[in-house]
Image (tube, rainbow, N blue to C red):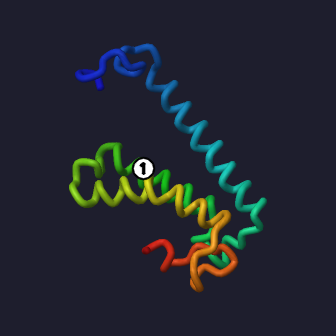
Amino acid sequence: DAINEPYRPIPSGRISEGQVIAQILGLLAAGLALAAGLDVWAGHDVVANPLNSIFVLAVFGSIVSYLYSAPPFKLKAEGWRGSFALGASYIALPWWCGQAMFGTVGGGAEGGELTWPVVVL
């Protein structure tokens, strides 16, 4: 961004690295707290079926999205690994969370539970 888009807040120096890190950690904590609250509200049994946990899915998405764009991993430059990370963290994750919260798909997901066949398909 420093070369291609120097007007953005970080390259232009309008916000410091410390402010960026504080914002990231604050938003991450708020998002994970919201996910945990949704699990409680929906009555999910996280121990019996962790795939049906919005919180577990949010942690997974947070980790994979970090690995996608942050050094030293920077999966977006790794071909198929980057494609998987992009698809799993930004594209499929909202569907999985919606399925875990509200949906029912076929015999493998009775009661609205997200199961491995649903995740893979």
Quadrant in the picture for the N terminus: top left
- Report the residue at 50% width, 32% height from top: 21
Query: Hey, which quadrant is residue 78 in on the image?
Result: bottom left
Quadrant in the picture for the C terminus: bottom left
The 10 Å Cα crowd at callout 1, few under 14, some 14 to 19, many 20 or more, is many
**29 on left or right of 80:** right
Q: Extreme front residue here?
A: 106
- Report the residue at 58% width, 60% height from top: 97
Rendering coords of residue 69 (x, y %): 34, 44
- Report the residue at 50% width, 75% height from top: 118
State whether residue 53 is above or below residue 63: below
SS assignment at label 1: helix
Residue nearest the viewer, comparing 5 with 121: 121
Q: Extreme bottom residue here?
A: 107
Residue nearest the viewer, comparing 6 with 63: 6
**12 on left or right of 23:** left
Residue placed under numbered mark 1 in the picture: 65
State whether residue 114 is above or below residue 21: below
Rendering coords of residue 43 (x, y %): 77, 67
Query: Hey, which quadrant is residue 36 in on the image?
Result: bottom right
Residue nearest the viewer, comparing 49 with 111: 111
State whether residue 107 is above or below residue 64: below
Rendering coords of residue 58 (x, y %): 56, 55
- Report the residue at 36% width, 56% height from top: 85
Tell me which amino acid carries mark 1: Ser
Rendering coords of residue 81 (x, y %): 28, 59
Q: Number of labelled discs? A: 1
